[in-house]
Amino acid sequence: MISALPERSVHLERAIRVRRTLTNHLVTGLAVLSTAIVLVPLVAILGYLIYKGASSLNLAFFTKIPAPVGETGGGMANAIVGSGIILAVASAIGIPLGIAGGVYLAEYGRGGLLGNLIRFTADVLNGVPSIVMGIAAYGLIVVHFKFSALAGGVALAIMMVPTITRTTEEMLATVPHMLREAALGLGIPKWRTILSVSLRTAMPGIITGCMLAFARVAGETAPLLFTAFGNNFWSFSLTQPIAALPLQIYVYALSPYDEWHRLAWAGALVLIALIMVSVTLVRLYANRGVIKGGH
Amino acid sequence: MTQPNPVTLPTPTVAPAGKTPEQPPPDASKPIQPSEIRKFLQERSSGRVVDGSFGGLMLVSALSIFVIVALILWVLVHDSQASIHAFGWRFFKTSNWDPVNGSFGALPFIYGTLVSSFLALLMAVPLSLCVAIFVIDICPPMLRGVIAYLTELLAAIPSVVYGLWALVVLVPIMRDHVGPVLERWFGWTGLFAEPNFGVNMFTASVVLAIMIFPIICSISRDVMKAVPIHQREAALALGATRWEMLRIAVLRNARIGIVGAVILGLGRALGETIAVTMVIGNHPDIVKNLFNPAYTLASVIANEFTEATGDLYISALIEIGLALFLVTIVVNAIARLLVWAVTRGSSTRTA
């Protein structure tokens, strides 16, 4: 009963209310402001990238190999193809292994100690720096053979496995149990149930997970520095040093030549376009599919 | 529900389900004819072998994660033996990095990694939390999807592109505009002293902050979302303003998970390589001045590994990699445990 309170208390009450409202507005304003601040670098990076990249992009970029120092022109055709080869190797190893691991976690190892341990290890492995994967692949493969596309692919595959395992598991966990029970009730063996019912139902989400892992490793430079090594010429062999788009961008960005800077920007635009198109497509696809991926 | 089924499996020729009660009861004197489906299933070999081997294959694939970790650890320990034997613990206590004379100490890199990561957290954490709060409670639902999408885009930009942008755009801004201002206002602290070439510890921290923002923001958002809705409602019903509700209901309940998110961001910052290598200046110094070029554990590997001559040099670099591996494993393990403690039950996305 405010009317029953003494005069001073009413003032105090009002002062407190004003302070609380002000604090509330202040925090709200702060939150809005920080969102705006955070969006600035994103817009700046994308804007500058498109501006610089688009003005440097030409047909030669997609058809020519790098020109020798001092000559203008040249492109990154070999790096684009090289990235494709390395990523194909990485996907061929990483995607089946990751999905199978996810199937184990979701269908066999749910709640068990081993399952939890694998889950935890996958999460921790996910946070290991990519440069460490590079040295590991160097020590495991390059030391015994040589710099090669295969070594680069293995380094990237190691990075894909934990991500894909965890997303596959999460997606399978969203498949209703009734579907599995219905299949098992019809006398279908477990492996068929998993392949034709669980995996099939969760497929859009699993594809999303695979594409996100793919997009993440597609831009990785650090693990390729001492595995794929880079190459200024065409190479289609798995056992030879090979060029890769991120690697080429890195080398060109640090070079003192304007012409190479120009190519680095064009390469960055192509790389980011590839990644963003795949991520966006996958998002659309997953939102349309049976199971919604992520949030 | 283990009652015996009196009706055999319906063959494809049986009348529609509605007529089931009218079916003649099974004749006890005559053996029941197996249905078509049962015959089909009996003709096939037992599924046990296939089932078992499928399960085994899945288990082996899942165990490959342990194999990967064990292999990485083994190869790093094995290849860094020369350096471990030559220097022992001294390796992490001395600051003399002199490849020519074969003397290696990793202290400047440890210092660079810790300081750059700490500064990045200092900048990124308040911003991330504010944005997470904004997305969860303040912004209109229409904008929510857009901001989540933009955050994801920010996370999808490759490290080398951040590096390129930082080198060409951010470094001149830092050198010509931000640097002088900081020096005028905060020069007395000794943290910001000329000469400032733009490629330095401070610029690297800013780039790192931009790069770890998405992970901290999205995970703390997930954690805040996991707070039960009636906690918020209870706070609001008691007359709390929005900020008070956030403070007593959301932030308090989610604090462990938020700490986890911050530590995950720390793990990312500790290991970030390419973008940092491009802007930190790559000079092994331990000085207070943030405008001085520095070096981190990850960037010394990236920068010197391919040019390293001599077994001891390579071995020393691999030992740095081993240290980085162990530290990030510990940091990530702690962070994951904290995040799990909060979001157990509700699904979290792996970062």
Image (tube, coloured by chain):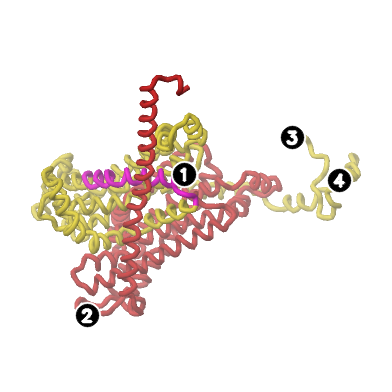
Chain colours: A red, B yellow
Q: What residue do we see at 23% from left, 64% from top? A: B168
Task: Return the residue nearer the eye: B50 or A171.
Answer: A171
Image depth: mark 2 or mark 4 in front: 2
Q: Amino acid at mark 2?
A: Glu
Disc on res. A71: 2
Q: Position of residue B304 (x, y in %)?
A: 19, 57
According to the image, label 4 marks what residue? B20
Quadrant in the picture for residue A66: bottom left
Q: Numbered disc 2: what chain? A: A
According to the image, label 3 marks what residue? B2
Quarter of the image with the N terminus of chain B is top right
Image depth: mark 2 or mark 3 in front: 2
Q: Amino acid at mark 3?
A: Thr
Q: Return the disc, 4 or 1, that comes first in the chain's sequence.
A: 4
Question: Alpha-carbon distance for marks 2 and 4?
Answer: 86 Å
From the viewer's perspective, is B183 left or right of B335? left
Task: Return the residue nearer the eye: B46 or B292.
Answer: B292
Task: Return the residue nearer the eye: B68 or A111.
Answer: A111
Image depth: mark 3 or mark 4 in front: 4
Q: Can residue B311 be seen by looking at this rendering?
A: no
Magenta region, residue range: B114-141
Image depth: mark 1 or mark 3 in front: 1
Q: Amino acid at mark 1?
A: Thr
Residue B133 magenta-highlighted: yes
4 and 1 marks in contact (CB < 8 Å): no
According to the image, label 1 marks what residue? B348
Question: Alpha-carbon distance for marks 2 and 3?
Answer: 82 Å
Q: Secondary structure at mark 3?
A: loop
Same chain for marks 2 and 4?
no
Question: Alpha-carbon distance for marks 1 and 2?
Answer: 51 Å
